[in-house]
């Protein structure tokens, strides 16, 4: 169809919420699981706004049996009085984009950016949304379907459906299956987010309840010690070098709060937040923090005679070796940048964090020299290992004992147009062999890997780089990696648009996925941020009916639906592994871009995978035993 010429008449002015339904990704990032959970976060953020304004102490979040979610707060209740538009203010807030902020003037807005703006976006993307407002002794009711109001106003005002002594707002909403690929909220992600919100808001209590069949549970998230408790939780199972350091301050209306605790393992884990948003891509606040911290440690190390005149300074990475920290700022009007709008760009945040960190840490270190010495010794250990690794890497590269030219078992594709190419990381030589036969040689590369790749979470750098599978992957992707030595990673050199993990749909396969995701998360996280990493979804079943076409089914839900919708007998074949499919079947079910099913990996998946790896493969026994105990009933014991 010829490209439509847009002109004054033909441009349809997308009224309010229609715009949200047409381009949901612009408002909630994606229509995948992350975007779906974001609906809850948008609503909860409004309650947090009400808390920050000083009127709300509790939030209840409930996953209902019917798949909907109910959120309630005990704030003032969305204003219901007549708005100049001639309808209740609540209806304006709930059904007009960016209408929230005008109704209240509390200094800091949470991630929605404006009080109440999230509700209208959720409204537009929900099959139904039901609202109860408890205010002025009355219970007011409003309701919508796909953003369209379905409650008759009485002279422009919401109907009163009851009397109450309470105040607050309750919203129940069911995401619209026409918008979202999946409409099942991820409970783990939600719990993690609610807990994080509790740490960042010590006076707020969040009540979580899951009423979904078989998942019933209730948890109360309340962290009166705030980010000090957060840092302790992040360090659970590790040996701390000192009690958490905590400070806060404000510079030109930018509030700064930080908690720091070093442990005796060689990792750096610094989480940044701005107005309760987790700044996954970092930003100016963390630049201010890291710059000041590194300068202070070097200056103190020289003052204490630990660094001699001739010694070079500790690097930033040295001084943060073993550091766990939460740096949370509240900014009246933050600027966010980055791929997922989670990089703080406000320049005044650098200055604020730099100043507060300097002033507060100087006071602390001057009073706690032993802690300071403990932290400096972490830097010293890191510097020693860094210098040794640099020497080892130089040796390896000069002796060319270690080179990135070995492609191992890569069956590369012919095209060099990275935007069209894809590489399958296939479990096992037999599936690898079928995949090499089945693939489209022009654009599809196959890299078979044997068994379990090295657990990169705990292995030291030289072991990781010596591992054949890892070396082949780094070399095949072509974009280098970032870790330890600093950032050799260059995504512009990536040879493939898609990196597709193709493993058996069993415990071993998912373990390999977890290890591969841990490797990518640790050494090439940008590949995940930029959406290059996928998991192939081979079929679990093939049904061969007595009459009709044979069909591939990809999960238990599809099999259940098939059983319900197909009369007559059929043979059911369950695929135990990729190796059971011949090349043609592998092509039509898992490789063919026209017919295959791919799951794009979100950074959350990788982060959780890395945590699972740390727990299962890490050096600490406690968390592993706990994890196995909690998940034992999920293990599929081979019959
Ligand atoms: C938050 O989660 C519980 C269900 O309702 C969601 C919500 O939007 N709550 C809310 C909004 N509480 N208070 C407001 C609000 C208060 C004022 C004064 C002004 C505006 C626009 C919203």
Image: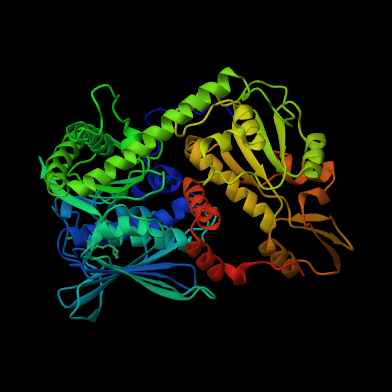
Q: x, y percentage for residue 539?
A: 73, 53
Q: Is residue 394 above or below residue 535?
A: above
Residue 322's image quarter?
top left
Q: How is the image coloured?
A: rainbow
| Residue at the (54%, 56%) spot, across then down | 182
Looking at the rendered image, the quarter that the N terminus falls into is top right
Going by the image, does 262 lie left or right of 361? Answer: right
Q: Is residue 494 above or below residue 333?
A: above
Q: Residue furthest top?
A: 398
Going by the image, does 159 lie left or right of 317? Answer: left
Q: Residue furthest right?
A: 546
| Residue at the (41%, 59%) spot, across then down | 237
Q: x, y percentage for residue 544?
A: 85, 59
Q: Nearer the viewer, residue 195 or 72?
A: 195
Residue 161 visible in image: yes
Residue 89's image quarter?
bottom left
| Residue at the (51%, 54%) spot, across then down | 618
Q: x, y percentage for residue 225?
A: 23, 63
Looking at the rendered image, the quarter that the C terminus falls into is bottom right
| Residue at the (69%, 65%) spot, across then down | 561
Q: x, y percentage for residue 347?
A: 21, 32
Q: Nearer the viewer, residue 273 or 72?
A: 273
Q: Nearer the viewer, residue 151 or 372?
A: 372
Going by the image, does 479 lie left or right of 583? Answer: left
């Amino acid at each position: 169809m010829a490209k439509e010429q847009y002109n004054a008449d033909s441009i349809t002015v997308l009224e309010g919420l229609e715009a949200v339904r047409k381009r949901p990704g612009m408002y909630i990032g994606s229509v995948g699981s992350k975007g779906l959970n974001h609906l809850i976060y948008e609503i909860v953020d409004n309650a947090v706004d009400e808390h920050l304004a000083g009127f709300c102490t509790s939030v209840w979040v409930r996953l209902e049996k019917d798949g909907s979610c109910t959120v309630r707060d005990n704030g003032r209740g969305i204003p219901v009085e007549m708005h100049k538009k001639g309808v209740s203010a609540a209806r304006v807030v709930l059904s007009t984009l960016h209408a929230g902020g005008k109704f209240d003037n509390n200094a800091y807005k949470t991630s929605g950016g404006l009080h109440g703006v999230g509700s209208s976006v959720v409204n537009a993307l929900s099959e139904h949304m039901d609202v109860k407002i408890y205010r002025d002794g009355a219970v007011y009711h409003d309701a919508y379907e796909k953003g369209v109001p379905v409650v008759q106003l009485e002279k422009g005002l919401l109907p009163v459906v009851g009397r109450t002594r309470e105040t607050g707002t309750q919203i129940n909403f069911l995401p619209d299956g026409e918008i979202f690929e999946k409409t099942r909220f991820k409970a783990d992600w939600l719990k993690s987010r609610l807990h994080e919100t509790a740490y960042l808001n010590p006076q707020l209590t969040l009540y979580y309840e899951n009423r979904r069949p078989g998942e019933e549970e209730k948890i109360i998230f309340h962290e009166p010690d705030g980010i000090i408790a957060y840092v302790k939780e992040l360090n659970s199972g590790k040996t701390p070098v000192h009690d958490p350091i905590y400070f806060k301050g404000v510079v030109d209306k930018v509030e700064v709060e930080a908690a720091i605790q070093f442990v005796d393992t060689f990792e750096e884990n610094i989480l940044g937040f701005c107005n309760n948003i987790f700044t996954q891509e970092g930003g100016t606040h963390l630049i201010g923090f890291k710059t000041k911290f590194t300068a202070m440690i070097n200056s103190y190390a020289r003052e204490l005679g630990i660094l001699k005149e001739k010694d070079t300074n500790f690097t930033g990475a040295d001084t943060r070796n073993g550091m766990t920290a939460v740096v949370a700022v509240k900014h009246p009007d933050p600027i966010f940048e980055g791929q997922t709008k989670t990089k703080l760009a406000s320049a005044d945040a650098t200055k604020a964090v730099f100043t507060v960190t300097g002033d507060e840490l100087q006071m602390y270190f001057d009073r706690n020299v032993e802690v300071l010495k403990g932290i400096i010794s972490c830097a010293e250990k890191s510097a020693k290992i860094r210098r040794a690794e640099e020497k080892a890497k130089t040796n390896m590269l000069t002796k060319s004992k270690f080179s990135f030219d070995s492609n191992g078992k890569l069956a590369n594709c012919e095209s060099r147009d990275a935007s069209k190419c894809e590489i399958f990381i296939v479990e096992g030589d037999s599936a690898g062999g079928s995949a090499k036969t089945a693939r489209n040689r022009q654009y599809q590369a196959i890299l078979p890997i044997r068994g379990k790749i090295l657990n990169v979470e705990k292995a030291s750098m030289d072991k990781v780089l010596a591992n054949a599978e890892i070396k082949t992957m780094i070399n095949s992707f072509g974009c280098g990696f970032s870790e330890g030595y600093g950032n050799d990673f260059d995504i512009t050199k990536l040879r493939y648009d898609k990196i597709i993990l193709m493993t058996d749909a069993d415990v071993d396969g998912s373990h390999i996925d977890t290890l591969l995701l841990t490797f990518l998360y640790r050494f090439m996280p940008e590949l995940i941020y930029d959406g290059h990493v996928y998991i192939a979804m081979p079929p679990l079943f093939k049904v061969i009916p007595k009459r009709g076409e044979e069909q591939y089914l990809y999960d238990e839900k599809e099999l259940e639906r098939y059983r319900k919708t197909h009369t007559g007998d059929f043979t059911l074949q369950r695929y135990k592994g990729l190796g059971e499919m011949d090349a043609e079947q592998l092509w039509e079910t898992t490789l063919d871009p026209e017919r295959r099913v791919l799951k794009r990996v979100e950074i959350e998946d990788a982060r959780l995978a890395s945590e699972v790896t740390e727990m299962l493969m890490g050096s600490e026994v406690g968390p592993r035993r706990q994890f196995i105990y909690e998940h034992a009933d999920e293990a599929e014991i081979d019959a």
